[in-house]
Every structure is written in C-alpha cells, then in structure tokens.
Amino acid sequence: MTKRLSRTSLLGTAVVSLMALGLPAVATSASAAPAAAHPVSERTVADVIPAPVQAKANPKADFTLSPLTVIRTDFGASPDTKQVANYLAGLLRPSTGYPLPVIAAPNFGWPAISLVLGHADPSAGTEGYQLDVAKSGVTLRANTATGLFEGVQSLRQLLPSQVEAKTVQHTKWTVSGGAILDYPRFGTRSAMLDVARHFFNPTQVETYIDQLSQYKINTLHLHLADDQGWRIEIKSWPNLTKIGGSTEVGGGAGGFYTQAQYTDIVKYAAARHITIVPEIDMPGHTNAAQASYPELNCTGIAPPLYTGTDVGFSSYCVSSPTTYKFLDDVIREISAITPGKYFGVGGDEAHSTSAADYATFYSHVLPIVAKYGKAAVGWHEIATVTPPVSAVPEYWDTSGTNADVVAAAARGNKILMAPANKAYLDQKYNVDSPLGLDWAGLVEVKDAYDWDPATTVKGVDKDSEIAGVEAALWSETISTSDNIEYLAFPRLLGDAEIAWSPKSTHNWDNYSQRLAKQGPRMTAEGIDFYRSPQVNWQ
Ligand code: TNX
C-alpha cells in the first residue's frame, strides 16, 4: 500500500483523503487513465468457465474500477471473509496498480466491490454465490466464505484478461454488467497430481493450486507414493524418503516433502478453498517403500530402486504383521497433518497381489484409516472388497461397465469419476503430442469436454450416486511446471465445467467459444497451454 502510494505520488497525483471516513488515503492519477481497452462486449457474465447456473448479461450495468474503488466487507466480517477480500485485492492490485483498500464498514455509497456473507439466495448452498454487477458497484453474496471465494473466481473473468498480469497494465478496468446465481452440480471437483513418478516441489504444487482454484476445483489429490518414489516424510520410517525419495522416473534426483512443507501446502490450498487428499498407493505400486525397508518384502530382501514406467510388479507382504504396523504409522502420521476428511488408499493395478490377498490386505487397512478419523478414497478396484459406505471408489477405466462399482453405488458408496479416456490429463492430445501417454487413447480438448459423469458407468446414472469428477495428471512423461500446464490446460477447464455446471449448459459449440476467450487470460497468467486446433483461439 505504501509503495503504491509513493509510486503514484511521484507521478504527480492528487491524494484524496478519505480519512474522515476512516479510510486510508487513496491516490488518483491522470496517468492511470485508461488506454485502449478490448470492448467489454467481448466478454459477458455468460462467458464464465465453469458455466454458471444462471447468468444475465446487462451491458448497461458495466462497472469500472478506478483508483477510488474499495473492496468492502461487512463491519465485523469473519476472518474467512476478510481473507477472501484480501485475496481479491491481491489479485487486482498488481495489474490495475490501484490501492483497492480492504475495508470493513457499511456501504456509504463509494465505488465498491462488496463481499457480503449471508443473505444469498438459499439455492447458492454452501459453495455457491450471487454476483451482481451494477454501474455503481459490484455486490457478491454467499452463504459461506467458500461461496465468496468461488464468486471471486467468476468476478475475475468479468475483467479484461490483462487483469491476470503481474505488472501494471493500462486499460479500462470494466467489469461486465449483469447478474449471476451459481452453485456446483457436484461437491467434489478434484485434480490429481502424481508427484511420485516425477517429483514436483512445493512451489510447483502451489502454482498448480492457484491455477486449479481459478476454475473452482476444490480438491487436490496428491499421489505421494508409487514404485518410483516416496514423497512424504514419515518420522517413524525415515528411510522411506532417504532411500525411497531419492529418485524418480528416468533416474533424476526425486525429492520429498518434509511434514512441515506438506503442512504448508495444505494451508496454501486451504486459503484457496482446496482440500488436499493424500494418497499412498498400495498394495501394489510399492517398490519405493519396499526398496527402503527389506522387512516390507515377503522375501526379506529389498529390491533395487526403480526408475522405469512399468506397473503391476510390486506388492506389500500381505501375510506379515510388519506391513500393517508400517501402514498404521504411515496413515497415523499423514492423517495427523491432514485436516481433510479423506485418505487415499490406492488399490489400482495390484497385479502381483492375489484377489484373496487383496481383500485380506484391505480388511486390515480400511479399519486403520477409520481409526485415524478418515474416510477412504481408492481406485475403483477397492469396490471389490465391499468397503464401508464412507469410502469413495474412483472409476478410472474406459469400458463403462463395472459390476463391482455398480454394486458399491447401490450400497451407498459415492463414486468419483475419472474415466481415463476423458479425464486423464496425461494422455496425448494427438499423435504428435510431445508429452503424455496414449494407452487410454488420444484425448483432444473436445474429448475431454464431451462426457457426462452420469453416463460414465452403466448403472451409476444418478447425480446422487456420484461424488464428482477428478482430472488426473500422471507424471511419467512430465517433470516441469510448463509440462504440467501443457497437459492440464486447457483440458482441465472442461473437467472443471463438467464437475461444476448444470448438465443443461453442456454444449461444445458454446463451450469452445467461451474457452477461446480464456486464451488471452491463460497467456497473461503465463500458463503454457496447448493451443488445440479445435478451438478458435482469440
Ligand atoms: C494407470 S489408472 C495408472 C497409473 C499410471 C497411469 C498412466 C491407475 C489408477 N493407475 O499407475 O500412471 O495409468 O496413465
């Protein structure tokens, strides 16, 4: 704030004192006068991704930010609400260069973006919001701070794309006029990041969290252990990270999160209304742990570290009590630093574990998860062991038929949908894609959008049977943030829309036009996205 004032003062500004109102002084500046702007008609409230439940554009009600604009919360607003207000100010200040003070006071009629907790339409529920843009100001209402946060994500898309720049831009900061009433179709709008095949450091994860939150994703599933790496400190089993964390696919140095770093990631995500779901894969995909401790192998011999990309060759020793003492420690330590209600128990591709052993294994592990206060999420194979109804099987296959998943849904388990031929962000876009795998087929931007969670598994066709959607990014072929961005963007936006928006809004032609308008936004943000020829990019 001080910096901003001194910068504008140097430009010869008039400082308008609002001290009488208890407001910080705000600078106005002739040099801040708008330069050529994109016509506001290029974007309307109906362009938002994910598509809102209701959006009524009113071009006569555009609001323009000025150096005098304030971000207002109610007097006595909760810390959560203030956090959203400060987050919004943090988004808008760098590119506008405006002070945008956050104030908690009644509205005395100054030009304001008001964040109001409560008094939202009841249909907004716990994550929805109402956004009204009028000539005089913007009012965002929600029943929860999460709803306000999601509303802020829509609001940012009503401003010119330059708003996403990190340095001052000269444009007319017009917010498209109109009204939005919005809430999600599914409660779980998830992304999975595989930090095991290649390690991504906390800053890289936090960058992805910022990008995810922008499209109303509320869950980040971290795949923390696989054959090629163990990525989280377990204090009672230090070799897991010392040995198991020391490499990755291709033989690179790997890495791991200390518990303190993981805790910081959890907090960073929480401030963006994203819950972290930690996953430790088991009873297969376990070579890194078994290389770290010989006693986790039925042979008593530790295998070498593995840096290839095969799956299905490893298995914990199901008959050994040490396996369950180990997993008790792992689940206890991670659960203690995970405020979210879910713990990921893996369960996929256990090709080296017999079906009987698989069932025995989970009869030990699922009660441990419950003992530490968590509910299990597992790849859909866990449906075969009749897990408690609190468990969420995640459907990843492509066939659309799975009797165990249908039976689990009938028992009351909610299913998370991540069909690999639609929602796997690691599949190639086309034969020439420089990154990605193709075992589930090529997944162009249209494929990633053209699906419905309620027709993904035959027999699981009610929204009430479905937890939501997960866009999964496996990392066999990727190792940098640019790589993440290239595979995730823009397909992630399709998954975000499928998870959030009412089915009635589903329409490729309309979506692809809205997606095209996200191009300049992603560019301004520095997101290295795939410019699919299926989209008429702006
Ligand atoms: C399958 S589908 C896997 C992962 C791989 C991925 C690559 C599933 C639950 N497991 O082990 O990384 O394919 O696309």
Image (cartoon, rainbow, N blue to C red):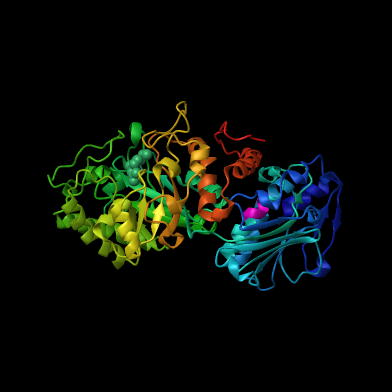
Residue drawn at 66 percent across, 48 percent down? 47
Quarter of the image for the N terminus: give it.
bottom right
Q: Main secondary structure of the magenta part?
A: helix
Q: Quadrant of ligand 1?
A: top left
Q: Is 239 situated above or below 484?
A: below
Residue 311 placement: quadrant: top left
**Residue 230 visible (yes or no):** no
Residue drawn at 74 percent across, 52 percent down? 175
The number of discs equals: 0
98 left or right of 504? right
Residue drawn at 21 percent across, 58 percent down? 324
Counting from the top left corner in percent of width and height, residue 462 is at 43, 60
**Residue 98 visible (yes or no):** yes
Quarter of the image for the C terminus: give it.
top right
Residue drawn at 87 percent across, 47 percent down? 30
Counting from the top left corner in percent of width and height, residue 363 is at 21, 61
Q: 467 and 435: which one is in front?
A: 467
Q: Is 253 situated above or below 418?
A: above
Q: Does the magenta stretch include residue 520?
A: no
